[in-house]
């Protein structure tokens, strides 16, 4: 009787309760997801853990940047100040990738030669007039 | 007859050791971050398993900061402790404190006046080796942190329970701990107990949900325990909440115990029902929400 009363009001008792915990159930409300405490905690945490798990300390990234500069400078003139090296996740595949953005300095008449050289080295990466992105993916 | 004899001869000559009865499982309860509910979880899961009829020993490995005795309400019955056993002042049996109600539940208390260096990994392995001969479950309450005290506590465990709350710092520390547990090939299995879940906040998108945390940690769920004042009240009484029949967190811990014992128990719905005002509003809108 008591249970029926509860049901009438749409309340659940412990015995009846069973929700499946399906990781795919995680649905932020579309409109307020971007700035809710929940989603910002979720997104910040993902980023923090990405760094924790790769165990890339800032000084290691720094060292890697320096080496990249040395290697790439052997082939093309690059903008050493503006190099960006970041860990990012592909939202679709969840694959963590190390993304390098390396601006290339181009002289007008050298554009084609560099285009060819870079295309040859990297095969798939498109070359814009003033800035080239080298995308390198790690496990 | 001869065939049988031949077969015997062709296999092993040494008399087969009489296979001992299956040994108890050693489970460490750990978290990285302090104060997230390791001791509460150890006391309640241990008591929950004992209620199901298993022989259980709870071991407080938090040397110098013992608390498990208080949560169990056994602080006045302690004569000897874990370190007394190691240093030969008593036998293991003498240091085990019997629970107030359940005869199949005992506590091996930590020493309060010593520090973590009094206990090392070999000690832990040796103690657990002896305990698992007499108990179905040996639960180890781990100190906070990931230093020596943690390493000592996980050294003897077959399984781990990772306790976290749905907060960034706790989940981050849990991730560290999971990495360390995975690196330890003596640990066969680990699962998460998410403690202090507040469904109302999750609903308002103010707090990460259980699913969020599971996804981030890629870990399997052993149970979710709500934030519950019953836990504070029962702690003050020295009575694990799992013994309080009408308590939701008690129910959640009873379910966890059953899952550890191998039962397939559905997860509790911790959602608080909508208030009657919400329901009225929904009615007037003509779009009654699903209960
Ligand atoms: N679900 C809960 N609801 C309300 N209070 C809780 C809950 N879980 C734990 N607490 C409270 O949080 C406090 C810390 O819990 P507990 O001692 O179990 O944590 P711990 O991880 O063992 O801490 P330490 O790292 O210091 O050993 C206690 O006061 C306890 O009563
Ligand atoms: Mg504790």
Image (cartoon, coloured by chain):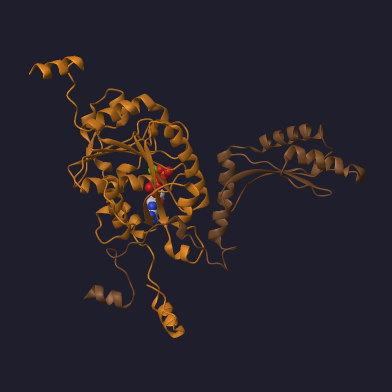
Residue B8: image location, x then y, percent = 16, 17
Q: Please state the quadrant of the image where ligand 2 appears.
A: top left
Q: Nearer the viewer, residue A21 or B54?
A: A21
Residue farthest toward the left in the current orientation of the protein: B1
- Residue drawn at (47%, 44%) of the image: B174
Q: Nearer the viewer, residue A60 or A116?
A: A116
Residue farthest toward the bottom in the current orientation of the protein: B284
Relative to B126, is B46 above or below?
below
Q: How many marks?
A: 0
Q: Is residue B39 visible?
A: yes
- Residue drawn at (21%, 48%) of the image: B52
Residue A112: image location, x then y, percent = 86, 43
Colour in which chain B is shown? orange
Residue A33: image location, x then y, percent = 56, 64
Q: Nearer the viewer, residue A90 or B160?
A: A90
Q: Which chain is brown?
A: A
Relative to B187, is B280 above or below?
below
Residue B125 placement: quadrant: top left
Relative to B246, is B235 above or below?
above
Q: Is residue A79 visible?
A: no
Quarter of the figure that contains the N terminus of chain B: top left
Quarter of the figure that contains the C terminus of chain B: bottom left
**Lateral position of residue B188 relative to residue A30, left or right:** left
- Residue drawn at (43%, 43%) of the image: B31
Residue B47: image location, x then y, percent = 25, 47
- Residue drawn at (27%, 22%) of the image: B88
Residue farthest toward the front in the current orientation of the protein: B3
Residue A30 placement: quadrant: bottom right
């Amino acid at each position: 009787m008591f249970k029926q009363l509860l049901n009438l009001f749409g309340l659940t008792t412990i015995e009846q309760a069973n929700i499946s915990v399906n990781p795919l159930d995680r649905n932020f409300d579309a409109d307020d997801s971007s700035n809710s405490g929940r989603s910002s905690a979720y997104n910040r945490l993902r980023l923090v853990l990405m760094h924790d798990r790769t165990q890339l300390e800032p000084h290691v990234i720094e060292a890697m940047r320096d080496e990249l500069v040395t290697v790439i400078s052997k082939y093309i003139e690059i903008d050493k100040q503006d190099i960006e090296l970041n860990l990012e996740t592909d939202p679709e595949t969840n694959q963590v990738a190390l993304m390098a953005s390396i601006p290339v300095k181009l002289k007008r008449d050298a554009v084609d030669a560099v285009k060819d050289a870079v295309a040859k080295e990297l095969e798939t990466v498109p070359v814009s007039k003033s800035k080239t992105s080298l995308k390198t993916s790690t496990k | 007859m001869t065939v049988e004899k031949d077969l015997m001869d062709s296999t092993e000559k040494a008399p087969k050791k009489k296979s001992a009865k299956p040994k108890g499982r050693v489970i460490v309860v750990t978290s990285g971050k302090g104060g997230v509910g390791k001791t509460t979880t150890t006391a309640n899961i241990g008591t929950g398993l004992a209620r199901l009829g298993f022989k259980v020993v709870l071991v407080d490995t938090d040397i110098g900061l013992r608390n498990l005795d208080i949560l169990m309400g056994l602080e006045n019955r302690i004569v000897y402790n874990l370190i007394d056993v190691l240093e030969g002042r008593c036998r293991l049996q003498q240091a085990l404190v019997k629970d107030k109600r359940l005869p199949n539940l005992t506590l091996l208390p930590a020493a309060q006046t010593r520090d973590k260096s009094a206990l090392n990994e070999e000690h832990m392995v040796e103690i657990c080796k002896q305990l698992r001969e007499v108990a179905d479950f040996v639960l180890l309450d781990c100190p906070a942190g990931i230093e020596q005290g943690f390493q000592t506590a996980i050294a003897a465990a077959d399984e781990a329970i990772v306790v976290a709350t749905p907060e960034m710092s706790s989940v981050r520390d849990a991730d560290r701990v999971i990495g360390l547990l995975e690196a330890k090939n003596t640990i066969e299995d680990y699962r998460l107990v998410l403690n202090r879940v507040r469904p109302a906040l999750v609903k308002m998108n103010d707090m990460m949900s259980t699913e969020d945390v599971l996804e981030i940690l890629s870990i399997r769920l052993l149970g979710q325990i709500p934030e519950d004042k019953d836990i504070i009240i029962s702690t003050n009484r020295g009575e694990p909440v799992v013994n309080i029949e009408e308590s939701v967190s008690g129910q959640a811990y009873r379910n966890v115990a059953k899952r550890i014992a191998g039962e397939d128990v559905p997860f509790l719905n911790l959602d608080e029902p909508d208030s009657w005002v919400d329901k009225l509003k929904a009615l007037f809108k003509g779009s009654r929400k699903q209960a």
